[in-house]
Amino acid sequence: MSKRKAVYASKIKRAVHMLFYRRHKKPGVKGWELRKALGADYHKVLSILDEYLKPLDLQVKTVFEEGEKPSSEKPTLEELDKARFYITLRGELTPKEAKMIGWRIDDLAGLAITIAYIISKKGKAPRKEIEELLREKLPGWKASLNIDRYIRYGYIAQDENEQLYLDWRTRAEVDQKALIDFILSK
Amino acid sequence: MQSKKERVKIGRERLQRIIEMCKAVEERSLDPFLVDVDEIIKVVREFFPDWEHPEDLCLDAEAINRLASVIKLQSEWVKHRSTTLYTDPFLLEEKIKSLDREALVEAFLGAWHPIVELEQISLHSLRGALAYWESLPPLKDRWKDFPPPEETRGIASREELLRLKILRDKAFTEELENFWNELKRLVAEKGENGKIRYWDFVGAETYEETIHRAFLTSFLVTYGYAALEVYPLEEEIFIKPFEKQQRRIGKKQLVSLPIAITREEWKKWRKRAEAK
């Protein structure tokens, strides 16, 4: 193995440790942390790792700050430093698999409704409206409990005016455009 | 013709209304195009020459500031509508309502790529933990640093112990048995078929006393001194005392029955009881 290859192999290992194991309260690693640990070429390390993960149906996901898209096609170093990197599933789960990782079908449907509704309302919707919408399909007490649960998991956030927003986990895990398209095409 | 004072008063009211309207649009996510910007600017301009006091000028500045926020919202609204993410909320709401949960889950799973995360302990943290454990002095060494607290001796009165809830003014079992006897007596006097309406038994002069009686009643039922009979269609609950305490036999599943003792319910019961 050439010296260069060996260096990259070791950097990939380090990146795997950082990305798979939770280091902070929230999962994922900030770009600047990766730069500090892997060097300035950390983005290249991540793209090689992404290739390795492809056959395993996993991917390295980059989420830019506050869900903003980079100013141009190629993000700047500053934008990458502020971005957060995660390992996510590349493909899709089946309903059976979703159940196996601890999600009831009702709760997942509620999450889909909540996220889709907030997206359609330009990223912000009153909690009351969402609760009413959930009550169409869930018992009343469960609607409110489920919203609290989605907040706890980081899918949505709530401000002091009881407005709900999409939070970091939705930005990392959900392809918002695809979700709306799928719902409308059903 | 309006006096200057009247005009200033009207101007203040109108600015206040503008501020409230802009605030409502911002906070309740209403359509920002409900606000007629030109009309508001006209009003602000009309009254501006009348402002002399700093507080009026502040009000004027706040109205402009709120209006600027609404204009920003309008710009974001237009931007959002021009993106591929824009969907008519009404259309989406209708769609969501018409889909069953399986279809919704199917749509969500198509767009969901959950994060992979592990929370196991790593070799690095194990090494750190081991080092910490080795450097940690034994408890007997650590605790001897703290001098034992000085003991002050004294005599606590029975009243003090009651206040601190260390002693009860009556032993609980004794209180419960007295309560059971009261239930039996009331059933004999006012009951029918060996039972009495739940509220007629727990209801008391004050709300606090009612709560206390309901609390004791729950123990009567749990400990086998009495049983509850629930008639959901008639919305009636009766309590029936046993002659002897019943022991739980076999593995029959116990059922918890929550009964709300709200102040409103108590007031209703009081009214009914007084009418009788």
Image (spheres, helix red, strand yellow):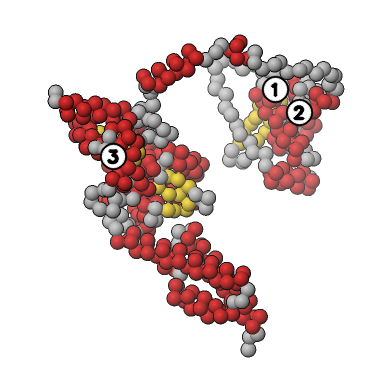
Query: Are labels 2 and 3 assigned to the same chain?
Result: no
Question: Residue sitting at 37 percent across and 64 percent down?
Answer: B75
Residue placed under numbered mark 2 in the picture: B183
Residue placed under numbered mark 3 in the picture: A61
Total numbered labels: 3
Inter-mark Cα distance, 3 to 1: 63 Å
SS type, badge 1:
loop
Type of amino acid at the residue the image marks with label 1: Tyr
SS type, badge 2:
helix
Inter-mark Cα distance, 2 to 1: 10 Å
Type of amino acid at the residue the image marks with label 2: Leu
Type of amino acid at the residue the image marks with label 3: Lys
SS type, badge 3:
strand
Q: Position of residue B191 (x, y in %)?
A: 75, 33
The residue nearer to you, when weighing A140 against A67, is A67
Is A56 on the left-hand or right-hand side of A138? left
Q: Are marks 3 and 1 in contact (CB under 8 Å)?
A: no
Q: Position of residue B30 (x, y in %)?
A: 45, 62
Residue placed under numbered mark 1 in the picture: B225
Question: Residue sitting at 66 percent across and 17 percent down?
Answer: B146
Chain containing mark 3: A
> Would residue B218 be visible to someone looking at this image?
yes
